[in-house]
Amino acid sequence: QIIQWNVRGLLRNLDDIQELIRNHSPKVLCVQETHLKSKTTNFLRQYVIFRKDRDDALASSGGVAIIVNQGVACSHLPLQTSLEAVAVRAVLFNKLVTICSLYIPPQHQLHRYEFEALINELPEPYLVLGDFNAHSTLWGDSRCDARGRLIEQFLFSSGACLFNQKKPTYYSLANNTYSAIDLSITSPSLLPLLKWKIINNPYGSDHFPIVLGTQIDNQCLPQVPRWQLDKADWEEFQKATLISWSEMRGLSVQAAVDYFTALLIDAATKCIPQSGRSTKRRVPWWNTECRNARKKQNKAWRLLRDSPTAENLENFKNLKSQGRRTRRQARRESWHKFLSGINSYTQEARVWNMVSKVAGRQVHALPLVNTQGDSLEDQANSLGAHFEQVSSSSHYSEAFRRHKTRIEKQKLERKSPRHEAYNEPFCLAELQASLNCCNKSAPGSDRVAYEMLKHLPLETQKALLSLYNAVWFSGEIPSAWKEAIVIPILKQGKDPSSVLSYRPIALTSCLCKVFEKMINRRLIYFLESAHL
């Protein structure tokens, strides 16, 4: 979903923005009249903010922003227009879409060439969402003005489409009147993909939030649940993973590895909590008073909407102000409660964790490295092709490539009359020594973590050892051990839109990495003993 809203002060109504995010989980929010200054940063976790502030004003006013979920691939689109507008290109609805947030103040003298110049800067397909302060009966206002006629002429001549459904988007508290001045303009190709609806509650603003929803699954960076290993029930995990090698002896190496992995994941699912499943984030200060204040404010708004009297208007204003004070007080008390609990015995990690949450952390956008690609798969393929080229054998000399090819064709004979120790079966001590030197690390695609292997009961460790020896003597590498989750890491100070700016980190199977450590320890011992 995409939400557009003239928020009338983003920080002032940040609670309402957070509530909209919790309730609707939008991928993008286009907001107007943000009233931000350049020094204001890091106020929304998990979202990247592209903005244009009105820095030349004496008091906070105007300003536009586009707030994008950090899992959406996007990039900032620089604009030459003098209008208050900001634009991004993002992968949404299986397309590369241009989104523009626009605010045109009532006093601004808008010219048609000025507006058309802005549209010409936006690659299709595009969405222009904002407060136009334009009146026309075409989109449900009670009157027409010059700016409304200008937008009408643009729509009729350009082929652009309008989502509005002749419903009011603004309520004037001073005049107790409704009007439709927030518009949603789009390229024709996006019109059938989205449904336009108004949230009939202005919250702390005098404009109604507008939701553009779709039935298409928006491609977003998947949130893979993480094991909360510090909360695991290891006693139950050991019971659930108890197995002997005799239960797998008749299986092929591939089938035995698959069976053992499935056993671990099934036990982990039952005994280890997972995080990252919910998109709704609770705030620590939200309490019963905040909830009741919100209910009273919403009830007062519904009463005013159905019966717009002076008494109901005054009641709504009072309850809206009261709700804002209640939330501000709840935040303050929550912070004071935390501070009062800090003493010389408080863990340092807990203190810094809370300080980091309060300060906010810089969230970076998932960048576009292929501006022609319409999907996350296109972006991944661009990075994959680059990593493949960087790691290919083409960088070696011709002589080395010939030598490599010749050596790889030679068949290794495991039997030798000298009976080298490094060819012998592995023992339990080697497995346990390798497990002990495993530090915390993200698991591979099989989701088996080092901590799970460290907490296996002795009988299961013996079964795992037998499995490793079966792999060792068969020479067959299980398919899951050949897979890796490749994560592109941006090099410091490099251009995020270039594939050349990334280095890969590969997350491989922890089962495989423990086996590699066992082999490595054995080979290092042999080489050092032979003074090689």
Image (tube, grey):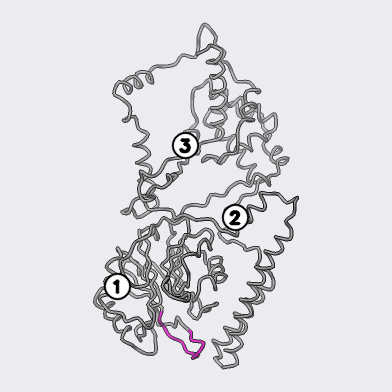
- Residue furthest to the bottom in view is 310
Q: Is residue 264 above or below residue 122?
A: above
Q: Determine which residue is flagged by label 3.
A: 483
The residue closer to the viewer here, 154 or 33, is 33
Q: Residue at x 43, y 59 (%)?
A: 218
Label at residue 160: 1
The disc labelled 1 sits on which kind of residue? Ala
Quadrant of residue 396 within the rendered picture:
top left
Q: CA distance from mark 3 to mark 2?
A: 35 Å
- Residue furthest to the top in view is 417
Q: Secondary structure at mark 1?
A: loop
Count residues near mark 2 (Cα–Cα under 10 Å), then give few for <14, some for 14-19, many for 20+. few
Q: Is residue 73 above or below residue 15?
A: above
Q: Secondary structure at mark 3?
A: loop
The disc labelled 3 sits on which kind of residue? Glu
The disc labelled 2 sits on which kind of residue? Ser
**Residue 437 placed where, x, y %?**
62, 30
Residue segment shown in magenta: 171-181
Q: CA distance from mark 2 to mark 1?
A: 45 Å
Label at residue 336: none
Q: Determine which residue is flagged by label 2.
A: 356
The residue closer to the viewer here, 93 or 26, is 26
The residue closer to the viewer here, 341 or 497, is 341
Q: Residue at x 67, y 53 (%)?
A: 351
Query: Mark 3 vs mark 2: which is more N-terminal?
Result: 2
**Residue 529 placed where, x, y %?**
56, 13
Whether label 1 touches label 3, CB < 8 Å: no
Count residues near mark 1 (Cα–Cα under 10 Å), then give few for <14, some for 14-19, many for 20+. some
